[in-house]
Amino acid sequence: MEDVEGNLATGKPAKKSHKKWWIIGILIMLFLCLIVTGIAALVGFGGFTFYKTLAAPVGPIKGQLKAINDGDYKEAYSYCSDSFKDETSYQEFVMIIEDNPQIFKSKKSTFSNVRIENNIATVSGTITGKDGTMTPMTYQLVKEKGYWEILNFHEGVTEKDEEDTTGI
């Protein structure tokens, strides 16, 4: 039996199509996902750039320590700035390393504080020697010829080194 509109009469109301609302809902969800993804990308990129800027001065320190551990003191000396090289000869540099094996012959290094002011970066952290000795160290680097190079280093961390630093 058919009703007035030509539908079969089954005693149940005819189902309305919700297809249009499903499509609208899906489009709204896709639009919201795009907005959230865009915001996350902008924040992430900005955070990555910030991290990369602060991490950059740590690279030469890690490179120098690796070269020392590999026994390549000339390579290690190449990470030093022109100012450092003017004040410290290669032979003096080698003596510093050999007189402090508990520091420079390392198995691990962690540099958790980086402060950059103008073209000078102050980086402090801990170097763990192969004998297990943990030594707090502070390095200063200068940006020369577009690269961070080691200006000086000393054992210990001063109060100024700990102020206004950013963990990395």
Image (tube, rainbow, N blue to C red):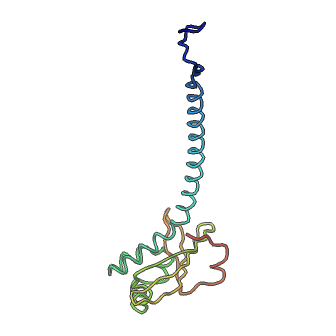
Residue 54 horizontal/vertical position (percent): 56, 65
Q: Is residue 152 above or below residue 20?
A: below
Residue 28 horizontal/vertical position (percent): 60, 34
Q: Nearer the viewer, residue 40 or 147?
A: 40
Q: Is residue 160 above or below residue 7?
A: below
Residue 154 horizontal/vertical position (percent): 53, 85
The residue at 50%/83% (across/down) is 87
Which quadrant holds residue 163?
A: bottom right
Q: Is residue 72 above or below residue 130?
A: above
Q: Quadrant of the C terminus?
A: bottom right
Q: Nearer the viewer, residue 61 or 133?
A: 133
The residue at 55%/48% (across/down) is 41
Q: Is residue 110 above or below residue 92?
A: above
User: What number of labels is visible?
Assistant: 0
Residue that protrudes farthest toward the bottom in the picture: 99
Q: Nearer the viewer, residue 66 or 33?
A: 33
Q: Is residue 103 left or right of residue 23?
A: left
Residue 33 horizontal/vertical position (percent): 57, 41
